[in-house]
Amino acid sequence: MYISFCRIAHGRNCKGFTLLELAITMAIIGLLTVSVVGLYAAVAKRQREVKTKKEMESIREAVLGYYQNYLVLPSPDSGYLVPIDDLDLPPTAQTDEIYTGRYYAYVATNDGTPFSELKVDGQSIGNTAVILISSGVNLTFEENNADLTDGEYTQDGTTADFDDILICLSANELASAIAWRREIEEEVAVSNQAATILAENDDDADGLVDEDLGGECGVDDPPGNCDGITDWNLVSGVQSLINAGLVSNPDHIVDPWGTEYCWDSVNHKFYSAGPNKTDEGCGGDDICP
């Protein structure tokens, strides 16, 4: 049987398509449609996964920044929510909006220290600071992720439906993140000690210490506060320590960003101007041990 479009259009007979040909054509169109829709769905899912991982990495970086500033980890909000107030993040950082609003699971210790031992996919991963989990498209924490309290989690699921996304922050990464802070603390401690020596020992305020004063301390002024006066006005910054011969190592003069350590004349201590190299009086990103 033919379906003639010529008769319909022009009022005359001509050969048209058979029902079989139309059926085959429609089947091909259907297969192509299914393929295109399936491909689009796969691409869209992949894009959602990439965007979610990017969001999770931004949370991870915020946790690292918090640890650099306070040397402890932020504790989870109630219900294993991301502690957005501590991390100075917007409310959207708590919610995996791509997957219709399911909360991220933020797993960390309440005292801000790394876990002593955790297992991921059955393998011990040692000291771990934070685990961040997205429930994926199906909005369900699956396999070991279903119980957030037992210290065992799943990254590579055993079923085809598993789509949780898991990101870890290790204790080693924490140590690396604050290596420069430890360096600053050590260098500042040296400078603070030198500042105290200068303030206590420069009895005639000429910028030098251990002088021959001929006073109550004797001929040679030994290290110590001979006149009982600590004059912090004698310390004006690292240059005053250099002039007094108390600091000679260049590493103790500048911070990791190449800026001279700043002097806090009120609290009598040195501090770093931080990555932006701007003295903000122990505010902003200044690092004040």
Image: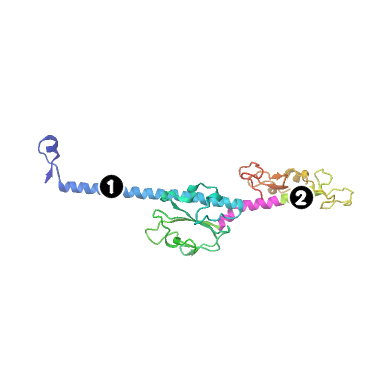
Helix, strand or loop at label 1? It is: helix
Q: Which residues are magenta?
A: 171-189
Q: Which mark is residue 33?
A: 1
Give x and y (percent) for residue 134: 45, 54
Query: Could you classify mark 1 by the number of other residues whose Cα lies within 10 Å: few (under 14), some (14-19), or many (20 or more)?
Result: few
Mark 2 is on which residue type?
A: Thr
Does the CB distance between marks 2 and 1 fall below 8 Å? Answer: no
- Assign the magenta stretch its main secondary structure: helix
Give x and y (percent) for residue 180: 62, 51
The magenta stretch spans residue 188: yes
Residue plotted at (13% across, 37% down): 8
Give x and y (percent) for residue 207: 80, 44
Helix, strand or loop at label 2? It is: helix
Q: What residue is shown with label 2?
A: 196
Residue plotted at (46% across, 50% down): 95
Instruction: Name which quarter of the figure residue 274 lies in.
Output: top right
Mark 1 is on which residue type?
A: Thr
Query: Is residue 103 left or right of 185 when viewed as pictured?
Result: left
Residue plotted at (18% across, 46% down): 22
Front in this rendered view, residue 33 or 176? 33
Query: Is residue 153 left or right of 243 when viewed as pictured?
Result: left
Q: How many marks?
A: 2
Q: Tell me how the rendering is colored.
A: rainbow
In the picture shown, does residue 124 fall above or below 202? below
Query: Is residue 137 left or right of 216 when viewed as pictured?
Result: left
Q: Which mark is residue 124?
A: none
